[in-house]
Image: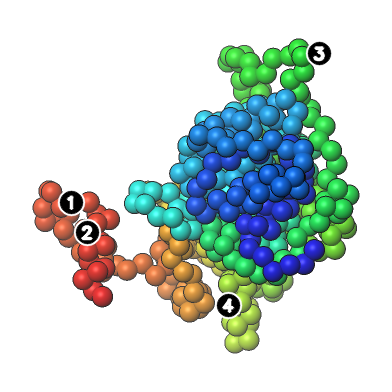
Amino acid sequence: MWKQTEGSRAVAETVAHCRPEVIAAYPISPQTHIVEELSRLVRSGTLDPCEYVNVESEFAAMSMCIGASAAGARAYTATASQGLLYMVEALYNASGLGLPVVMTVANRAIGAPINIWNDHSDSMSQRDSGWIQLYARDNQEAADLHPQAFRLAEELSLPVMVCMDGFVLTHAWERIDVPDQERVDAFLPPFEPRQVLDPAEPVSIGAMVGPDAFTEVRYLAHAKQTQALEAIPRVSAEFGEVFGRVSGGLVHPYACEDADTVVVSLGSVCGTVCDVVDEMRERGVRIGALAVTSFRPFPLEEVRAVLGGARRVVVLERAFSVGVGGIVSANVRTALSGIRLDGHTVVAGLGGRAITKASLHRLFDDALAGRLGELTFLDLDTGLVERELARMARTRRSGPSAENILRDVGSNR
């Protein structure tokens, strides 16, 4: 059903149409609007039967989902940033136990310093937790990925994380075709758990496993992620047959057929990158873009197929591994093993800093001219950084860097 709505509400309505039986909720910006709307739908009787549980923390939210899923219920929650970190132990339990929980992550920076705006630091920190991770390019895809997430989770018996950019998508109002109940029912079958706690047939889950079998159990987690590489495009195609649009999948190449330079990115910035690609194409520049939807599992073959013919790859990412550099680019390098080309990592948009078309034009022009290094922080104010480094070198008790830099920013206004 087409409607002008907020991204969070579109996701909440779509999740409701997936008929979750248990929703565990704890508020944290910028995901709160999602669980608020689901609360309203449960209270009004629109979403029934469903148990909506206000819990005391994010750890409790994931623990509640684990218990509900183990008992055979379709379970859902949402979180962001420090909230995701607070449930880390339970994240690994959900994936290790093979429980098909679905969770929306409204991507937000991780403190300190405190920052409530968007980047991918939170979900990237959990890239190896055993959850499937899907990144939405826009609010239509954010809504569409949720029925696909439940389908994948329950088919593979794996939890799935749907990542949508906080505020950039969650709080944006736009025209969205919210997946309606009839088509979601046609696409998403009732949940038939692979394992279930049933008093009539007692079993135990969460066994203690020693060195004699731990490697084999952990390998199965890898094997199931490998199975997801086949399942994700198939489920996306079946979604397309029911809903009549392309959404989800592993990757989305744009103008890459003859591209010498390809820009790799995840999430909402992909739209801005495609706009810049169009404008540079008008100048005769052979440049393309590759959006990665599935970061876990990482589609090595599909990425290699798109990038293998290029001369230059720029990986634009909204998180980084401190002390090393890019996270996404490390995966891209694995995909391109044995292929020689110029590779550049660009860290951009941290803590909600805007990634503008003007900045991308300058960046890509630098890449084409050979002026771009291996690791670049887009629009980094080097003056601020050098002043703080000088302060730290000048005196032992230089004080907290965040507060020092804020004072410098204020003095420049």
Q: Nearer the viewer, mark 3 or mark 2?
A: 3
Q: Secondary structure at mark 3?
A: loop
Distance from label 1 to label 3 (Cα)?
63 Å
Kind of residue sitting beneath label 1 = Gly
The residue located at (84%, 60%) in the rendering is 243
39 or 385, which is in the foreground? Answer: 39
Give the residue pinned by disc 3: 200
Residue 110 visible here = yes
Quarter occupied by the C terminus: bottom left
Scheme by which the image is coloured: rainbow
Give the residue pinned by disc 2: 404
Distance from label 3 to label 2 (Cα)?
63 Å
Kind of residue sitting beneath label 3 = Ala
Q: Nearer the viewer, mark 2 or mark 4?
A: 2
Quarter occupied by the N terminus: bottom right
Q: Secondary structure at mark 1?
A: loop
Q: Secondary structure at mark 4?
A: helix
In the rendered image, the vertical position of residue 251 relative to residue 123, given as above or below = below
In the rendered image, the vertical position of residue 72 relative to residue 13, given as above or below = above
Give the residue pinned by disc 1: 399
Q: Earlier in the sequence, mark 2 or mark 1?
A: 1
The residue located at (71%, 47%) in the rendering is 44
Residue 282 percent location from the top left of the image: 63, 86
Q: Earlier in the sequence, mark 1 or mark 4?
A: 4
In the rendered image, the vertical position of residue 200 relative to residue 308, given as above or below = above
